[in-house]
Image: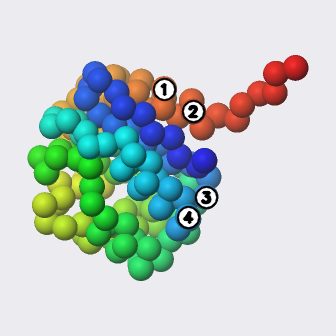
Amino acid sequence: MPFAIELHEDPSVVVAVCDGVFDVATFECYLDEMESLGPFRIGTDLLVVFQDSVRVDLDSNAIMAGAGREMVFSPGATRVIVANDRLVFGLSRMFASFCPSASSRYRVVESLSSAARELEADEIDLKAVVDKTALQLAPRQAVG
């Protein structure tokens, strides 16, 4: 899978790291995975990090459909998307704008330090949980 999702307790955040090709099928799998993990307790925030090498292949219809799906976070949860690629940033902003007003706390930022400010979290702690989650994306070595 070109994404990994992990719930962290300190800070209380669900981290999703995306890499590789993020297309319609991947987007739907990501949303299904989030639904299967939730609902999350009040106070749990969301951080989605698009790695520099990610390639997003979504159209506006897929983004609108995804934005309209029921989310498993409380209305007060902060949701932050980190995207430093201009296209991914723009598509993320489109997604955030299509979300229902009850979910309007999406922020799209260009760096992890900006995400830390939005989530009111320590940047070093946040980087550690992102790195830990990203390890799930590493190709597994054959054991023999």
Packing grade of label 1 (10 A; few <14, some 14-19, many >=20) is some
Separation of marks 1 and 2 at Cα, in angstroms: 8 Å
Which residue in the protein does label 4 denote? 25
Identified at 43% across, 42% down, the residue is 16
Amino acid beneath label 1: Lys
- Classify 132 as above or below 60: above
Is 135 or 27 nearer to us in this picture? 27
Q: Secondary structure at mark 3?
A: strand
- Classify 86 as above or below 1: below
**Going from the N terminus, do you reach mark 2 or mark 4 first?**
4
**Going from the N terminus, do you reach mark 3 or mark 1 first?**
3
Which residue in the protein does label 1 denote? 132
The answer to whether one can see residue 36 in this image is: yes
**Going from the N terminus, do you reach mark 2 or mark 3 first?**
3
In the picture, measured across the screen, residue 77 lies left or right of residue 48, that is left
Identified at 40% across, 27% down, the residue is 129
**Going from the N terminus, do you reach mark 4 or mark 1 first?**
4
Which residue in the protein does label 3 denote? 21
Horizontal and vertical percent position of residue 75: 13, 51
Q: Secondary structure at mark 2?
A: helix
Foreground: disc 2 or disc 4: 4
Amino acid beneath label 4: Ala
Amino acid beneath label 3: Val
Separation of marks 4 and 3 at Cα, in angstroms: 10 Å
Q: Quadrant of residue 22?
A: bottom right
Which residue in the protein does label 2 denote? 136
Amino acid beneath label 2: Gln
Foreground: disc 4 or disc 1: 4
- Classify 65 as above or below 78: below
Packing grade of label 2 (10 A; few <14, some 14-19, many >=20) is some
Q: Secondary structure at mark 4?
A: helix
Quadrant (top left, top right, bottom left, bottom right) of the C terminus: top right
